[in-house]
Image (tube, rainbow, N blue to C red):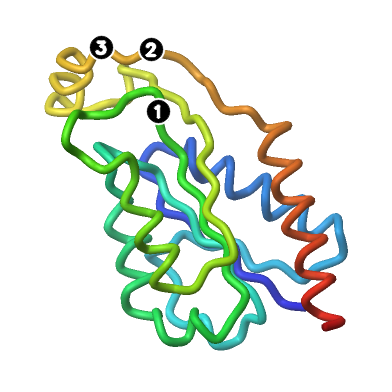
Amino acid sequence: MKVLVAVGSKYGSSRAVAKTISTVLEEQGFEVDFQDAADVRSVMPFDAVILGSAVYGGLWRRDASSLAKEHREALRLRDVWTFSVGMENVVVEGQPKDEAYGISEKVGAHEHKRFAGSLDPERLNIGERALIRALDPPLGDFRDFEAVTAWAEGVAVQLRELAVS
C-alpha cells in the first residue's frame, strides 16, 4: 500500500512530527512518500494520505489547506487521516480551536489528531513575536513523540484492516 505523508510546516516542528509518522509507517511495511504539502502535485498515485499542518491562530498553513481544497475529490476517494501541530492550550476567544476539523470533514478523513507543538521565540518574525507577547503562551518544545508514534501505529493497524475489507 502506497501512503503519502504531507505536511505544511514553517519552522520544522510539524515537519518533524510528520517525519516520525512517515518513519513509523515505513517500519510497519508501507511504501511511504514524505513531502511538504506545497510540493504535492497529485494524490492519485496513493492509496492513503496523511495530511498535517502547523496551526497558527486556529488556522492551518495555506499550503496544507490548499492541498486539501484543490484535491478534495481525489482525497475523498482515498483513506485519509489529518493532524495538526500547535500550541493546544492557546485559544483566542471567538476563534475556532482549529480549522482542520472542517478540512478533515470535507476530505472524508477517518480521524483528525491534534499534537502539541514547539514554540521558540528566537525563530519567529517580528509580527509573530508581537502576537506571542500578547498571548503569552508557554514557550518550549511540547511535542510528545511517543504519542505521535502511538497514533501512527494505530493508523497502520487501520490501514491493514481497510486493505483486507
Q: How far, Cα to Cα, is label 1 from label 2?
A: 8 Å
- Tell me the tag on residue 98: none
Residue 87, label in figure: 1
**Residue 128 higher or lower than 95, as above or below:** above
Q: Which residue is mark 3?
A: 136
Front residue of 18/137: it is 137
Q: Residue 97 appears at what percent x and percent y?
A: 32, 39
- Residue at the image position 76 percent from the left and 71 percent from the top: 31
| Picture coordinates of residue 75, whole percent (x, y) | 49, 79
- Residue annotated with mark 2: 138
Q: Residues within 10 Å of mark 2 (few under 14, many from 20)?
A: some
Amino acid carrying label 3: it is: Asp
Q: Height in image: 103 above or below 40?
A: above
Question: At x 64% / y 74%, what residue is drawn?
Answer: 48
Identify the residue at image location x=77%, y=64%.
158
Q: Quadrant of residue 47?
A: bottom right
Which callout, 1 or 3, points at the residue further toward the start of the chain?
Answer: 1
Q: Amino acid at mark 1?
A: Met
Mark 2 and mark 3: span between their CA atoms? 7 Å
For the residues labelled 1 and 3, the Cα–Cα distance comes to: 11 Å
The kind of secondary structure element at disc 1 is loop
Q: Secondary structure at mark 3?
A: loop
Q: Residues within 10 Å of mark 1 (few under 14, many from 20)?
A: many
Q: Quarter of the image for the N terminus: give it.
A: bottom right
